[in-house]
Amino acid sequence: MPTAPADKNPRDCTIADALDVVGDRWSLLVVRELFYAQRRFTEIARNTGAPRDILTTRLRKLVEHGVIAREQYSERPARYEYRLTPAGRALSPVLLTLKRWGHEHVRGGADPVRFDHSCGHEFVAGVHCTACGDTLANDQLTLESKE
Amino acid sequence: MPTAPADKNPRDCTIADALDVVGDRWSLLVVRELFYAQRRFTEIARNTGAPRDILTTRLRKLVEHGVIAREQYSERPARYEYRLTPAGRALSPVLLTLKRWGHEHVRGGADPVRFDHSCGHEFVAGVHCTACGDTLANDQLTLESKE
DNA sequence: TGCGGTCGGTTTGATTAACCAACTCACTAC
DNA sequence: GTAGTGAGTTGGTTAATCAAACCGACCGCA
């Protein structure tokens, strides 16, 4: 990866922007559950392990940032479920690259959860340049900070 | 955040494993700085905005998990710097997908930091299946949980 | 010999957030 | 009418966070 000039204040950076929204212990696990089509508060709480009050604040924050949407599925009693918005669905590359990293560099052995790709093989995420299609290798990126 | 709340992670999942290591507000920003070759405590503190004491605990945790290494670069006075290990370098796909998401779904407008790929175009990260090479599209993944 | 500055932290003390258990409210089903 | 469920709230406690000050070992300069 590229090198950057030493600035004096925290960087103006879209990685930081992304982390402001999903850079805590629970948010990405909530998004994971919604990818698994677990849309209900209680299911999400159970599958993530997040305390219920924290989950409440995280869900609100994610709704506020347009990552998920809260929809009523029952009038009486009032019951709600959560769904990914397009912005939320766009997080799949982040989850898939994290999954691979967690598998290869945190946990050894077999991954307890496998995704199969429509090509017939297990899905393992790789990253490529959307312009030329080449898989990313070391030292191929140059920083172009804009003034 | 440092301590994972007593094994409350009901889903056995390598995404959660990854987040146990880098799923807090500062860790990925630290890794970002190391990608930018900012290796010193003071530089990392300045460029991330992390409080110095928090940075101390995060750096120790990342060393502990093998993401970064602490190396002495001066005997007297004793001075240290941090470097990415191969595991740390393997986080680039996570940072690049987060960067794209932050740009497209959190901040509008131009990305303040651009990477240029060796192909001559701006680098925008895409995700593909490492088996067949196809770019990921919706509804191509099937869950294969193993019991 | 003294003065200012750097580096890599640690300490302090106040604020904030996370956590957990128990509780509510509005129902449904028995 | 008792039990259970879903989606949260509430209260009390612990733990993490933060900004700012402090520290020790140097280094450069005069």
Image: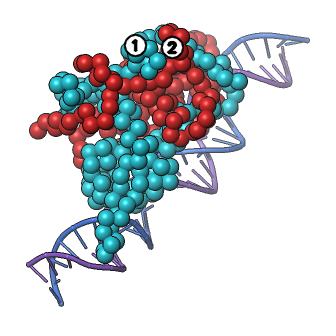
Chain colours: A cyan, B red, C purple, D blue
Callout 2: chain: B
Q: Give the percent coordinates (x, y) of residue A110.
A: 18, 27
- Contact between marks 2 and 1 (CB within 8 A): the answer is yes
Image coordinates for residue B33, horizontal then vertical, percent = 55, 24
Residue found 61% across the figure and 35% down from its top: B109
Q: Say which mark, if any, is on residue A18.
A: none
Residue at the (46%, 54%) spot, across then down:
A63
Relative depth, front residue between A117 and B68: A117
Which numbered circle lies on residue A134?
1
Specify the subunit that label 1 lies on.
A
Asked whether, in this view, residue B110 is left or right of residue A94, the answer is: right
Left or right: residue A45 versus residue B56 is left
Residue B140 location in percent, x, y? Answer: 25, 33
What amino acid does circle 1 point to? Asp
- Alpha carbons under labels 2 and 1: distance apart: 10 Å
Work out whether residue A120 or residue B76 is closer to the camera in this orientation and state it.
A120
Q: Amino acid at mark 2?
A: His
**Quadrant in the picture for the C terminus of chain A:** top right
Callout 2 secondary element: strand
Mark 1 packing: few (<14 Cα in 10 Å), some, or many (20+)?
Answer: some
Please tell me in which quadrant of the rendered image residue A25 appears.
top left
Residue under circle 2? B117
Q: Residue at x 44, y 47 (%)?
A: A67
Relative vertical location of residue B6 with respect to residue A15 in this rendering, above or below: below
Q: Residue at x 26, y 45 (%)?
A: A36
